[in-house]
Amino acid sequence: MTIEHVVDAALEKLPARLRRAREKRNMTLTELSTRTGISSSTLSRLESGQRRTTMKLVMQIAMELEVPLADLVAAPSVQDPRVQLPRPRTLGRTVLPLTRQTTEPKAYKLVIPASETESVLRTHAGYEWLYVLSGTLRLRLGPHDIELGPGEVAEFPTEQPHWFGSTGRGQVELLSLFGTQGEMMHVRAHTRRSDITAQDCVEFAGREASLSMATE
């Protein structure tokens, strides 16, 4: 926010602040006019925003109303721009939703601790796409037991017995796209290093969500 925007925002709030400060003192416009020497019509226009004020006028009014000048002209506070996402934990891992869309596929960032190494195969409806951001991911899929490093991608139907977690050598961070309808993600499963970047994954998640909304 520029200085001009800060000043404009403070001036925009000034009329209402002047009125509240006067009413809090149970003072009429006529009484305030008598004490400040400012005409009632000028005070009325200041409180309605019909007249642009000056620092001299504001200081006179603040002194008579016995309010700090900052209470009248303080700029609005700048809020923390960071979005505080919930950090739900599922079976020891942190699962962060990357979109608030309710359509599929849904995108998540997963953080799996090094201690999560016990593999229990499970099945459920859907299709999952994984992209490793950091660490080494162990993936068991049916008879296959493979390891994926940063930049590597895998996708599979979740009706097949599967599990993925840490190798025990450190924490793993990955992106996951999941859909219950079992639609393929247009990237063939493989274990070689991919040229796909993390930004590509995020953009892909956004495009898939937009396409799902368009077809509803």
Image (cartoon, helix red, strand yellow):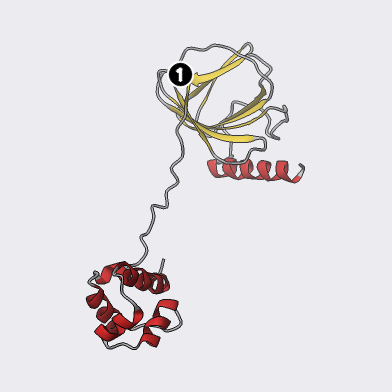
- Residue depicted at 71% across the width and 44% down the height: 213
| Above-or-below relation of 22 to 137 | below
Q: Pinpoint residue 9: horizontal percent, then vertical percent.
A: 41, 70
> Between residues 25 and 178, which one lies in front from this camera angle?
25
Q: Secondary structure at mark 1?
A: loop
Question: Which residue is rendered at x = 35% and y = 67% of the image?
Answer: 75
Q: Is residue 131 above or below residue 81?
A: above
Which residue occupies the foreground of this view, 146 or 40? 40
Asked whether the viewer can see residue 140, the reply is no
Q: Does the rendering let one see residue 77?
A: yes
How many marks the image carries: the answer is: 1
Amino acid type shown at disc 1? Thr
Q: Which residue is mark 1?
A: 167
* Residue 83 left/right relative to 148: left
Q: Is residue 146 toward the left or the right of residue 85 in the image? A: right
Q: Residue furthest right?
A: 215
Residue 31 x, y percent position in the rendering: 29, 81
Image quarter hosting the N terminus: bottom left
| Vertical relation: 29 (above or below) 205 | below
When asked about the image quadrant of residue 58, the answer is bottom left
Residue 147 x/y as whole percent: 52, 21
Q: Residue at x 46, y 24 (%)?
A: 93
Dividing the image into 4 quarters, which one contains the C terminus? top right
| Location of residue 177 in the rendering, given as x and y in whole percent from the top left corner | 61, 33
Horizontally, residue 52 falls left or right of residue 206, namely: left
Front-lying residue, 26 or 204:
26
* Residues packed near mark 1 inside 10 Å, few (<14), some (14 to 19) or many (20 plus): many
